[in-house]
Image (cartoon, rainbow, N blue to C red):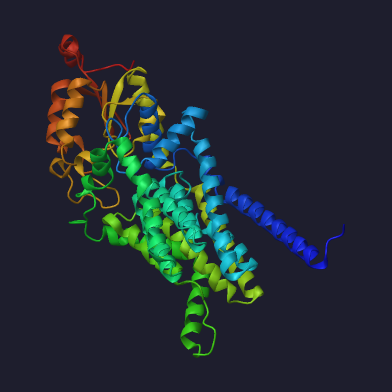
């Protein structure tokens, strides 16, 4: 029986819509793969990847998160690494690179869906494509690494996507997913509540959002012991979150991060400025441009506020601004003619190509140093030996395939040193509460066969840390210096005198 004209029209429209979304998703996948190609050309990209990879191995060896395996981050991404290693092996990060590609695609598709609902089909394309381009708009070590923010972003976009459709429980669950990826992901709760208020959804919706956001986080706390969970993701980082004495370094880092992302989004920013000026000049009867963006401005402001927490201003912190900025850019391009919007989008694509090229040509000095350090560690130790890398680059453990002698994978836990803040408030007295007694027990119970001072002149070097300096003097002797990193091999009572007499220790 032939369809009626109305039914045929709806069928044709639905088929066209499916075809359009199929094309859009295909384009977003292709663009994401192309913009993230540099991530597959280098391992690791930054210490966070090395930290996560080392944690995953510790968990595989029977470690317990927030007890024998610790970090200041929530559990989702460490467990994701652990799961990937369990399925694909722990010698490569390529499965996490693929997972990062999928995370960007999911975020871009959700952003496109948000833009389509508000401004139409053309905005869907610009919103999704701008999202992909902006995810590489910072230093390559911050954008190409498969770390916390990359996996947090899809949850934040999903939270707003659910809230816009009045699916309040789903919005709350997505907020929880963002928080369990990284604490600052909770900033997306503000635009969710803004949408709830705009919809006049009532207290029932508010409680569904709250329950969805709270229950997964509370469940995680109960699973990992509430006291330890709270300490490691919140209360134990007081000194780390302080910028006292840091001078201008945090400010300069903040300017660098915002400057790079603004450069990557410059055509969108110009279009936004033009649209905002048009709004100011519009008469009372004129339709104001950028309609339907109040929650996006709240989202952008909340994300910027989240990036400032702790005054560290690492570049990857600013990735949190990408979703609202991409959507605001889509709204601004929607106000332009098709030709002007195409030019702006092409300029954004060109800038993304520049950042991708930077990814292929970025300095490999730190990666090469980490590999030389790992090679030296292997030459002095057996596979079963535990080692201590006293520095801020825990990727050495993963590259060397050696187990850490301590649950503290960087010297930052024990000295409060941070690359984002510099050398302000650094020393034993600024360590996390209770860290040094626990660390000393670890050294006594299972002494590391090799200790590597990888501080390379920084203020947290072992010679400036009295407790560790005394421990080295009693039980270790210096055997090598590679790239400014000093290697100390454990001496045993029966060979102490002979090794001191010869003054030489041979690699194993």
Q: Residue at x 18, y 42 (%)?
A: 431
410 to 350, vertically: above or below: above
Q: Where, quadrant-wise, is the C terminus in this rendering?
A: top left
Q: Quadrant of residue 471?
A: top left
289 horizontally vs 400: left or right:
right
In the image, 277 versus 402, the foreground residue is 277
Q: Residue at x 17, y 49 (%)?
A: 425
Q: Residue at x 40, y 32 (%)?
A: 56
Q: Judge whether residue 155 can be spotted in this image.
A: yes
Question: How many circles with numbers are drawn on the protein?
Answer: 0
**Which x, y percent locates residue 374?**
38, 28
118 horizontally vs 254: left or right:
right
Q: Where, quadrant-wise, is the N terminus in this rendering?
A: bottom right
Q: Residue at x 44, y 72 (%)?
A: 294
**Which x, y percent locates residue 469?**
15, 31
**Which x, y percent locates residue 90?**
46, 28
Q: Judge whether residue 156 can be spotted in this image.
A: no
339 to 82, vertically: above or below: below
**Which x, y percent locates residue 192?**
42, 62
């Amino acid at each position: 029986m032939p369809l009626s004209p109305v039914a045929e029209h709806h069928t044709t429209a639905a088929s066209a819509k499916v075809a359009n979304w199929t094309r859009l998703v295909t384009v977003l996948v292709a663009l994401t793969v192309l913009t993230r190609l540099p991530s597959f050309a280098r391992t690791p990209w930054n210490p966070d990847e090395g930290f996560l990879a080392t944690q995953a191995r510790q968990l595989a060896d029977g470690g317990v998160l927030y007890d024998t395996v610790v970090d200041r981050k929530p559990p989702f991404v460490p467990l994701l690494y652990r799961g990937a290693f369990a399925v694909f092996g722990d010698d490569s990060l390529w499965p996490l690179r693929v997972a990062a590609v999928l995370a960007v695609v999911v975020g871009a598709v959700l952003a496109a869906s948000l833009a389509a609902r508000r401004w139409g089909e053309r905005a869907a394309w610009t919103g999704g494509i701008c999202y992909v381009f902006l995810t590489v708009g910072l230093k390559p070590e911050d954008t190409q690494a498969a770390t916390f923010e990359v996996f947090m972003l899809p949850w934040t976009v999903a939270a707003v996507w659910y809230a816009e459709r009045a699916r309040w429980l789903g919005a709350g669950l997505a907020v929880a997913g963002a928080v369990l990826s990284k604490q600052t992901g909770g900033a997306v709760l503000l635009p969710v509540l803004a949408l709830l208020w705009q919809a006049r959804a009532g207290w029932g919706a508010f409680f569904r959002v709250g329950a969805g956001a709270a229950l997964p986080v509370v469940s995680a706390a109960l699973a990992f012991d509430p006291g330890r969970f709270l300490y490691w993701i919140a209360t134990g980082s007081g000194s780390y979150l302080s910028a006292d004495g840091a001078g201008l370094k945090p400010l300069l880092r903040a300017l660098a991060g915002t400057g790079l992302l603004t450069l990557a989004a410059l055509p969108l920013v110009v279009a936004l400025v033009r649209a905002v000026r048009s709004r100011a000049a519009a008469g009372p009867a004129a339709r104001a441009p950028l309609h339907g963006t109040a929650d996006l401005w709240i989202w952008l402001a909340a994300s910027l506020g989240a990036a400032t927490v702790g005054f560290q201003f690492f570049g990857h912190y600013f990735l949190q601004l990408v979703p609202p900025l991409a959507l605001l850019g889509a709204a601004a391009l929607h106000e332009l003619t098709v030709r002007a919007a195409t030019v702006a989008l092409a300029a954004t694509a060109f800038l993304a190509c520049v950042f991708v090229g930077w990814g292929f040509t970025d300095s490999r000095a730190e990666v090469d140093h980490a590999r030389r350090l790992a090679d030296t560690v292997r030459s002095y130790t057996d596979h079963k030996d535990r080692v201590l890398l006293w520095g801020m680059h825990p990727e050495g453990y993963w590259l060397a395939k050696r187990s850490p002698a301590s649950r503290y994978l960087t010297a930052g836990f024990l000295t409060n040193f941070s690359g984002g803040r510099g050398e302000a408030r650094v020393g034993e007295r600024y360590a996390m509460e209770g860290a040094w007694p626990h660390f000393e027990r670890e050294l006594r119970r299972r002494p590391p066969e090799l200790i590597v001072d990888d501080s390379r002149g920084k203020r947290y070097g072992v010679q400036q840390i009295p407790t560790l300096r005394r421990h080295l003097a009693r039980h270790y002797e210096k055997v090598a210096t590679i790239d400014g990193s000093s290697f100390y091999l454990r001496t045993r009572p029966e060979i102490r005198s002979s090794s001191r007499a010869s003054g030489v220790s041979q690699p194993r």
